[in-house]
Amino acid sequence: MLLIETIELFEMLRFMKRGRFLVLTTFHDIMTLQDMARKIRVEYPGAIYHVMSRGDRCEEIFKADSDRERFLETLGEVCVKTSWQVHAVCLMGNHFHLVVETPHGNLIAGMKWFLGIYTARFNRRHKLFGHLFSGRYKALIVDGSENGYLKTVCDYVHLNPSRAKLLKPKKPLSAYRWSSWPEYLKAPGKRWEWLRVDRLLGEYRIPKDSVAGREVLEQAVEARRAAEAVAEYRAIRRGWCLGEESFRKKLLAQMTERIGAEHCGDERLETEVARAERIVHAELKRRKWKEGELVERAKGDVAKVAIAGRLREETMVTVRWIAERLAMGTASYVNNRLYRWRKGTLM
């Protein structure tokens, strides 16, 4: 849209009557609406994204280290639910960066759950209410074809504390605690379970996740830190895609074919239900139950509550769906039972 057309649209909308119409009161509102309409989420199995989200009005999304710990805990939970693989993460004062791979093509559903749950926990802890994050999160699609694009975006994320001058020049990058970078330098058994390091090691041509290999990785990233040029990250900050031209054209073709379908959610819902059904059938088989036993057993049966707990931990189906599928009464009853089950007070 040309600038003059945007201004004319603004002049027209500002005089609309209040009521059922959306009233945009500033030029910034118009530009924001235009920008949001232009960006379409692209999802497919195996997609890699650089995700970034800021606090509402650029306010802090972490008031204390306990908030950062809760954020990472929630990230671990959504990885279990969605099978996400995290390649890099960095928590800053009023925003976060995340490089995530989605084997099942479920970024939108996962981010909705992730940001919603963290916001609820943050607000409850600090006795607040309302939005925590500002508008839509940014999701840059990254070419994962081992041509260096994943390395570029992971370095960008890991070097954020240095660019923000949160570290003294002589301090190693690993001194910043709230990043996945220190985890990369640990032995495999001591890292976050949901962090995947092999792809970044591969792009640095490090054949083995060993002490020597991790030393080479640290030296390479510290050298990158010393020679960092801001201009090389322009595509990450301003673009929607980071990769080869062939990769970009393929994504554009996909967007053209699927335009309008990204927001319906039916396909994603069906996928989550199918995953939940597989868990239910596996639990029935493990317990040697017939399908009818779910109805015959009491709605508060401890074994049924355990199945409900697994569904809540490993999928994003609603509590209402779980209540109906397991014949457990209402959603509020299931929530009550799950709370007691987690506390160990369910008899």
Image: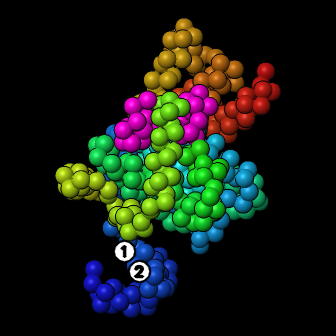
**What residue appears at the point 56 percent right and 45 percent down from the top-left corner?**
180
**Please, is residue 119 above or below residue 284 in the view?**
below
**Which contiguous range is marked in magenta?**
183-208
Q: Is residue 46 left or right of residue 73?
A: left
Labels 2 & 1 near each other (Cβ < 8 A): yes
From the image, tell me which residue sits under label 2: 30
Question: What is the secondary structure assignment of the residue under circle 1?
Answer: helix
Figure quadrant of residue 229: bottom left
**What residue appears at the point 47 percent right and 40 percent down from the top-left corner?**
216
Image coordinates for residue 59, horizontal then vertical, percent: 63, 69
Question: What is the secondary structure assignment of the residue under circle 2?
Answer: helix
Quadrant where the image shows the C terminus: top right
From the image, tell me which residue sits under label 1: 34
**What residue appears at the point 49 percent right and 85 percent down from the top-left corner?**
25
Amino acid type shown at disc 1? Gln
Image coordinates for residue 178, horizontal then vertical, percent: 63, 51
Task: Count every numbered label the image shows and give the total.
Answer: 2
Amino acid type shown at disc 2? Ile
Residue 187, magenta (yes or no): yes
Q: Is residue 310 left or right of residue 149?
A: right
Quadrant where the image shows the N terminus: bottom left
